[in-house]
């Protein structure tokens, strides 16, 4: 593993899209995760944003986030289908091969597995002509699903080659998911791994997880679960995962810093993480470990 395996998420930075792209490239990263807000919110319009991304030379890790697609009916479902089509077209324009989607947090959605399978098949089918893969994530504060283990059987049951899963270290740690389950996941169906730590020892309720997840994440090596994150990455590597890792760090303090400083912090995190993971004899503890141990 080296720097080429890792990328940054624009949500980690403050500043313009161009500043985020420049900082990511200057720190030596080769790919970047984009938010749809980066594109549609650009002051000079969508085409200017697309041109800036293409001119940067950075590969687009993926585009996020399609929310609450599943479990809708009537006009709500029709509306979400149109949103999905628009985001898939944007993926194509950006050269992104991945669209991120997440499980429902809305009270309007239903959560039964058969409806979820049907909707994910629909979404995956919409993505086929544009050669986009759907990477599905389960937020730890979701209404019906809160752990990736709850979606794995649904994704397998949906049986679409361009439908896979996102594994996010924050949600794994915050929900207390047992890492022993990881080897049961087919590494070919892991389309993305997102990495971050957080400062609290635990986040017991969905509301606690939401609060920590949206304001208090930190880069691996700076939080209180550093050993577990290293073990998480090591287990994924041992499983055969060779895809992208993306730092998704929501932190209000980082939003007060110039993007170049945040990107350098991310680079130091890569060095720390790859060094720790490569030391095969280092004992890891599943009960948690603090940074620096």
Image: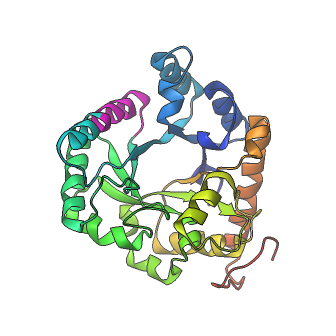
Residue that appears at 52% across and 75% down: 238
In the image, is residue 6 above or below residue 242?
above
In the image, is residue 42 above or below residue 193?
above
- Mainly helix, strand or loop, the magenta region? helix
* Quadrant where the image shows the N terminus: bottom right
Residue range highlighted in magenta = 83-96
Q: Position of residue 244 (x, y in %)?
A: 51, 53
Residue that appears at 52% across and 79% down: 179
Q: Position of residue 209 (x, y in %)?
A: 58, 64
Q: Residue 205 versus residue 22: which sits nearer the camera?
A: 205
Q: Position of residue 147 (x, y in %)?
A: 44, 70
In this orientation, does residue 30 appear? no
Q: Residue 194 versus residue 86: which sits nearer the camera?
A: 86
Q: Is residue 90 magenta-colored? A: yes
In the image, is residue 64 above or below residue 90?
below
Q: Residue furthest front?
A: 107
**What is the total number of numbered labels drawn onto the structure image?**
0
Q: Is residue 261 magenta-colored? A: no
Q: Residue 248 versus residue 241: which sits nearer the camera?
A: 248
Q: Position of residue 232 (x, y in %)?
A: 58, 72
Q: Is residue 211 left or right of residue 191?
A: right
Q: Residue furthest top?
A: 44
* Quadrant where the image shows the C terminus: bottom right
Q: Is residue 108 left or right of residue 227?
A: left
């Amino acid at each position: 593993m080296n720097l080429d395996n890792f990328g940054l998420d624009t949500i980690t930075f403050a500043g313009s899209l161009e500043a985020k792209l420049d900082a990511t490239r200057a720190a030596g990263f080769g790919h970047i995760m984009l938010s749809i807000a980066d594109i549609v919110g650009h002051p000079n319009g969508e085409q200017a944003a697309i041109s800036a991304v293409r001119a940067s030379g950075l590969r687009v890790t993926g585009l996020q986030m399609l929310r609450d697609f599943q479990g809708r009916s009537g006009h709500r479902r029709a509306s979400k289908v149109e949103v999905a089509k628009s985001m898939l077209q944007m993926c194509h324009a950006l050269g992104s091969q991945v669209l991120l989607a997440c499980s429902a947090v809305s009270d309007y959605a239903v959560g039964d597995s058969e409806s979820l399978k049907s909707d994910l098949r629909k979404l995956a089918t919409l993505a086929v002509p544009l050669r986009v893969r759907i990477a599905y994530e389960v937020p730890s504060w979701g209404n019906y699903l809160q752990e990736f283990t709850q979606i794995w059987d649904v994704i397998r049951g949906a049986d679409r080659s361009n439908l896979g899963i996102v594994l996010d270290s924050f949600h794994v740690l915050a929900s207390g998911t047992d890492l022993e389950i990881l080897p049961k996941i087919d590494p070919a169906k892991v389309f993305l791994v997102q990495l971050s730590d957080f400062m609290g020892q635990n986040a017991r309720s969905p509301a606690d997880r939401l609060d920590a997840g949206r304001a208090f994440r930190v880069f691996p090596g700076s939080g209180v679960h550093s050993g577990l994150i290293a073990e998480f990455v090591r287990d994924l590597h041992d499983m055969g995962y060779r895809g992208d890792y993306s730092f998704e760090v929501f932190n209000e303090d980082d939003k007060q810093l110039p993007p170049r400083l945040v990107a350098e912090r991310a680079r130091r995190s890569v060095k720390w993480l790859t060094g720790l993971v490569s030391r095969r004899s280092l004992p890891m503890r599943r009960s948690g470990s603090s940074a620096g141990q």
